[in-house]
Image (tube, helix red, strand yellow):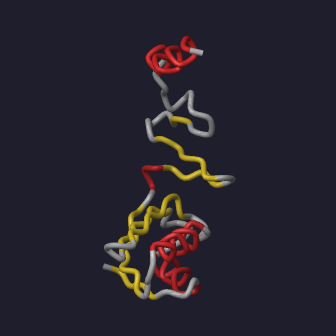
Amino acid sequence: MRWLILISLFAPTFLPPVSAETVQGGSLSKHGSASVSLGARRVQERSLTEARLQVLNMSCPLCAVTVRKALERVPGVARAEVDFKTKRAVVRYDPEKTDPKALIRAIEEAGYGARRE
C-alpha cells in the first residue's frame, strides 16, 4: 500500500509532455492554429470572437449555471463563462454561425435579461 501511494505521488513527473497532437479531439493546422472539438462542433480558435454581456435578474449561483448552459447550446459558441458575483458573461463564438443578438436571445429565453457591455 505504501508503494502505491509513493508511486502515485511521483507518477506525474514521469509522464511525457502533452502537445496538441496528443490531446484526443484536438489538432494543429499547418498554420499553427489550434482546433477545439466541442462534441460534433469544431471551431478554429483563430476565428473566434469574444462578446461581453451584462446578465440581469440573476439571484443565485445556480442562475449563472443556467445562463452558461443556455449560451453553450447556441450553435457556434465555443466557450461561455458566467460570473454570478459580477453579473457578467464572456462568450467566445464563431461569428459565421452566431452573433451577440442570438446570445442575448438565448439568455432571455432562459428567463434572464442581458445587454452588451
The correct choice, above or below, for 15 with respect to 35 in the image is above
Q: Farthest residue to the front: give it.
A: 1
Taking the image as shown, residue 53 lies to the left or right of residue 103, namely left
Q: Farthest residue to the right: give it.
A: 40
Q: Which of the two residues, 100 or 73, is positioned nearer the viewer here?
A: 73
Q: Position of residue 7 (x, y in %)?
A: 52, 14
Count how many numbered circles sit on residues in the image: 0
Q: Position of residue 5 (x, y in %)?
A: 53, 19
Q: Residue at x 43, y 88 (%)?
A: 57
Q: Position of residue 41 (x, y in %)?
A: 64, 55
Q: Which of the two residues, 111 or 3, is positioned nearer the viewer here?
A: 3
Q: Quadrant of residue 33?
A: top left
Q: Position of residue 9 (x, y in %)?
A: 47, 20
Q: Which of the two residues, 74 or 34, is positioned nearer the viewer here?
A: 74
The correct choice, above or below, for 77 with respect to 19 in the image is below
Q: Farthest residue to the top: give it.
A: 3
> Which of the image's four quarters has the N terminus?
top right
> Which of the image's four quarters has the C terminus?
bottom left
Q: Residue at x 53, y 64 (%)?
A: 77
Q: Residue at x 44, y 64 (%)?
A: 81
Q: Residue at x 31, y 73 (%)?
A: 86
